[in-house]
Amino acid sequence: MKLKLNKSIIEAAAPLETQDLLIWDEVLPALFVCVRPSGRKSFYAMYRLRNRKQQKIKLGDFPQMSVDEAREKCRALTNRAFDGFNPVQEIRDRCAVEADLAYSATVRDLKEKYFAEHVIHKKETSAKNEVSYWNVHILPYIGDKQVRAVTGGDISFIHNSIAKQPSRTGYKTTTANRVLEILKKAFNLAEEWDWRDEGSNPCRKVKKFKERKRKRFLSVAEVQRLDAVLQKYLASPDYRHRQIARYILLLLYTGARKNELMCAKWANIRPERGVLILPDTKSGEVQELQIPEEGFLILDDIRADQKKKRPNSEYIFDGHIHGQPLKDEGRHWDNIRAEAKLADFVLHDLRHSFASFVAMTTGSLLVIQETLRHADPKTSQRYTHFFNDPLRLAVNKTASTIKSVMKNEKVVDIETARRLQNAS
């Protein structure tokens, strides 16, 4: 196929099922676009050496490289080939002279380049998680293996090995899937860097384990047991005990994420609006956390207690090191959880519990989405089973109204109901 290449044509080009689709440029006959069955689109240049032997070389991927850039690069390569140079051989020679990582790189080298060019753009907490995944689950198995030599069997072994490890809530299948995602991205980048042949990602046939969203919420009895233990901690002479108890209570009353409260500052509280400004959130955007009246009472207790210990702390939950926030809850949460008999309950489940109470109280998905600050409404739908009580009440009232109409009893119409509601 030969067309005058432009952005619209390339974007509209649909891949074939079993073979590459080649679209040659009418403006520059040596240039073509290759559309692979996977949907990946790349620019290539075809040139002929003085010995009449044809060579092709990849110029770059679309849309990262524009049509104009591809034409310019193609012209430069074909001109050099006309002058007697072989661009492909130059690349090979440079690789041999410089011991190019494209041939000698190990998975440890891949990690370094992956962090330098990809992870550097992620949030600090995400980057820390990736460091752990690489150091604990990846490098001990294939760290010294050449990137080009890693096989699907290597990836499958790592994936399955992690999944067999026990965790607090069963096995580490979720961790195994996160590691697989990281490896898949890293080897995709390795292909872009020419560290592996195109389409050779060893993760491509390894299937993720099925994940079940956690649905662990505090029951009424569990809330009461947890509160009884927290009251003991609040009455403790130990400052850290009191601090952790208030931290847990605020998590439950607000549905905040752990790190959001740990790093929260006094200066970001807006009592006149009833919110805490969160400058660094999971979405990367500034958000507002709604604080209930009970939460402000807890904040007052924290401030009064903190003035005796750390009067100049800018953080609501000050850490062991002056000038730094609380880093973690240590063993305190494990002890509290054990005493409250919440064996399978993790700290993040307090957020789920808050959402369950919002659902029971309001029966509104929109309110859950706004209070938990979910970017995707589907995330809020896991709590819909708590809507049963509000729904039953609404259905019963509706049925009662219908029955009244059937019996010709007096029924308040919609407009009258609205006026009465506004008047109240």
Image (tube, rainbow, N blue to C red):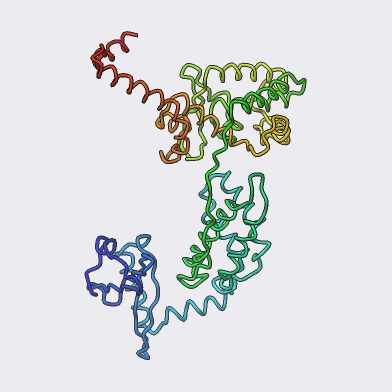
- Specify the quadrant that holds the C terminus: top left
Q: Nearer the viewer, residue 48 or 422?
A: 422
Give the farthest residue toward the top: 423
Left or right: 23 in relation to 138: left
Left or right: 42 in relation to 164: left
For residue 230, above or below residue 172:
above
Give the farthest residue toward the bottom: 51
- Residue 103 on image: x %, y %: 56, 74
Residue 352 image-quadrant placement: top right
Q: Nearer the viewer, residue 94 or 338?
A: 338
Left or right: 380 in relation to 125: left
Give the farthest residue toward the front: 407
Figure label count: 0
- Specify the quadrant that holds the N terminus: bottom left
For residue 37, above or below residue 325:
below
Q: Nearer the viewer, residue 231 or 36?
A: 231
- Residue 245 on image: x %, y %: 67, 25
Residue 56 image-quadrant placement: bottom left
- Residue 327 on image: x %, y %: 66, 36
Give the farthest residue toward the right: 237
Q: Nearer the viewer, residue 163 or 103?
A: 163
Q: Residue at x 63, y 45 (%)?
A: 169
For residue 2, above or below residue 280:
below
- Residue 350 on image: x %, y %: 58, 32
